[in-house]
Image (spheres, rainbow, N blue to C red):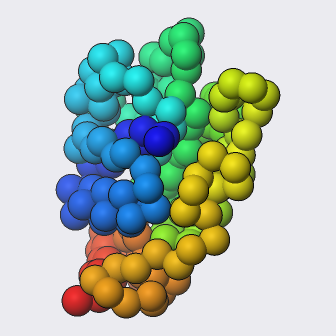
């Protein structure tokens, strides 16, 4: 079972990450800031780091720099909805140059999150496998949230708003 660490300063999103990823068979750890996330990275075996880019105190770029020499280094899925000065797409391009294996712009659906994770190759013995193809036993099965299979419409992350200081999120169906 792959272990995923999700780091995001939006504490509303962390339980969503946990719920949808655990439903797909992953072991999930969360941190609401980069400092706590980095400590977990140094004390736990993490296969995949899912990190927001813009966070106070220690952002996703700083985390990527801090773990550059880590052995074994987790794979990285960088996520961002952009910020005051740079759009998400630009931040994610920078993240890829800094070592992110895959990127995903907020807002995104659970299906888009899984598609991004499936693209990431992991070094397993023997050879390289793709998560979701040979190492993820639940690949191809629909994810159920609260007994419903409408996860493709669940939006994760801030929705684009006319006012850049306003964010909202579509809640999980009940």
Residue at coordinates 40% horizontally, 79% vertically from top-left? Answer: 144
Quarter placement of the C terminus: bottom left
Which is nearer the eye, 159 or 173?
173
- The answer to whether one can see residue 37 in this image is yes
Q: Residue 58 occupies which quadrant of the picture?
A: top left
Q: Could you tell me residue 69's position as x and y percent? A: 56, 9
The mark total stands at: 0
Quarter location, residue 140 = bottom right
Image coordinates for residue 9, horizontal then vertical, percent: 27, 48
Nearer-the-camera pick, 139 or 28? 139
Horizontal and vertical percent position of residue 166: 29, 74
Q: Image point 34% across, 79% down: which residue?
A: 145
Nearest the eye: 61 or 75: 75
Q: Indicate left or right for 142 with 26 as reference.
A: right
Is residue 36 placed above or below 55 in the rendered structure?
A: above
**Most distant residue in the right direction:** 127
- Residue at the location (36% across, 58% down)? 22
Depicted 143 relative to depicted 81: above or below: below
Front one among 47 and 153: 47
In the image, 161: left or right of 95?
left
Residue 52 is situated, as x and y percent measured from the top left of the image, at 42, 47
Instruction: Tell me what residue is drawn at x 54 percent, y 11 percent.
Output: 71
Q: Is residue 147 above or below residue 38?
A: below
Q: On the rendered structure, is 123 left or right of 39?
A: right
Residue 104 seen by the camera:
no
């Amino acid at each position: 079972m792959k272990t995923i660490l999700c780091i995001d300063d939006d504490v509303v999103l962390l339980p969503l990450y946990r719920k949808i990823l655990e439903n797909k068979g992953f072991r999930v750890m969360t941190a609401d800031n980069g400092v706590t996330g980095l400590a977990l990275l140094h004390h736990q075996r993490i296969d995949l780091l899912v990190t927001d880019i813009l966070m106070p105190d220690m952002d996703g770029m700083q985390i990527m720099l801090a773990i550059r020499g880590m052995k074994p280094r987790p794979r990285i899925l960088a996520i961002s909805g952009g910020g005051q000065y740079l759009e998400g797409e630009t931040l994610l391009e920078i993240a890829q140059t800094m070592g992110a294996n895959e990127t995903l712009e907020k807002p995104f659906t659970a299906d888009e999150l899984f598609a991004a994770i499936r693209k990431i190759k992991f070094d397993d013995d023997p050879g390289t496998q793709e998560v979701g193809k040979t190492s993820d036993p639940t690949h191809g099965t629909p994810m159920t949230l609260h007994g419903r299979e409408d996860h493709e419409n669940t939006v994760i992350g801030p929705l684009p708003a006319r006012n850049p200081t306003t964010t909202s999120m579509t809640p999980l169906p009940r």
